[in-house]
Image: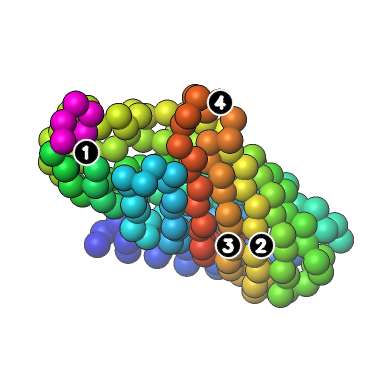
Amino acid sequence: MKTFKFYIVMIFIIVLARISNGQDANAQGLKFGVGIGIAGFSYSNSNISYNAAFDVGAKLKLNIPRSSFTPVAYLNYSFLTGKFSGIPLNTTVPFNSDITQKILTLGAGAEFKFVPDANLDPYIAVGIDYNHIGEFSFSQSALNLNIPGAISRTGFDGGAGLMIIIPYVFTIDASLKYAALNVMGKDTNENNINSWTLMVSVLF
């Protein structure tokens, strides 16, 4: 609770500082914020199914006045849960277990705005990502599941979003993105990992 109150106070101070300094949200400069979201992950191994995931993230963007192009960098941390259902190697006994997994994404890309400098600003986005895909944790112990450990891969994402700019205060950034997490650097016969993510961030 103390941590939550601290963040509320810090956000309030930042908002007051922007108002007092007369900094328009459309002005040139770096903007940084944090966000939360939900994600749906798919894994091309039929033994594994995911539930909806919870995401937290941070975003940095360079606003360029009168330009439709905006460079961005971002970090997302995904908390996944799901189920494993299959038959381990060298046995005929079915195995079922709840699973958890964490995925860290560091990315950079660009957003292309349809209406530069507008206070209601839709955009499309593309990016390249470094993904650290954590190992699976099982609620029950098992051997010979033929499941990979933690891996790091390069992927790509694309999507669309909407910025709602409140002048002199902050920007609300809502986006929906599709990502292919392990396009480059994958091993032979490695399963594909893809996701849809809905994220809402507040930028200052």
Task: Tell me the amino acid under the disc marked 1.
Answer: Ile
- Judge depth for marks 2 and 1 and give the one in front: 1
Which quadrant would residue 170 be assigned to in this image?
bottom right
Q: Height in image: 119 above or below 10?
A: below
What number is the disc on residue 176?
Answer: 3
Between the C-alphas of marks 2 and 3, the distance is 6 Å
Can residue 6 be spotted in the picture? no
Task: Tell me the amino acid under the disc marked 4.
Answer: Gly
Task: Tell me the amino acid under the disc marked 2.
Answer: Ala
The residue where tag 2 is placed is 160
What number is the disc on residue 62?
Answer: none
Can residue 4 be spotted in the picture? yes
- Judge depth for marks 1 and 4 and give the one in front: 1
The residue where tag 1 is placed is 87
Mark 2 or mark 3, which has the lower sequence index?
2
- Magenta segment: 88-92
Query: Which class describes the residues within 10 Å of circle 2: few (<14), some (14-19), or many (20+)?
Result: some
Element marked by disc 3: strand
- Judge depth for marks 2 and 4 and give the one in front: 4
> Is 116 on the left or on the right of 120, as rendered?
right
Between the C-alphas of marks 3 and 4, the distance is 25 Å
The residue where tag 4 is placed is 185
Mark 2 or mark 4, which has the lower sequence index?
2
Front in this rendered view, residue 144 or 21: 144
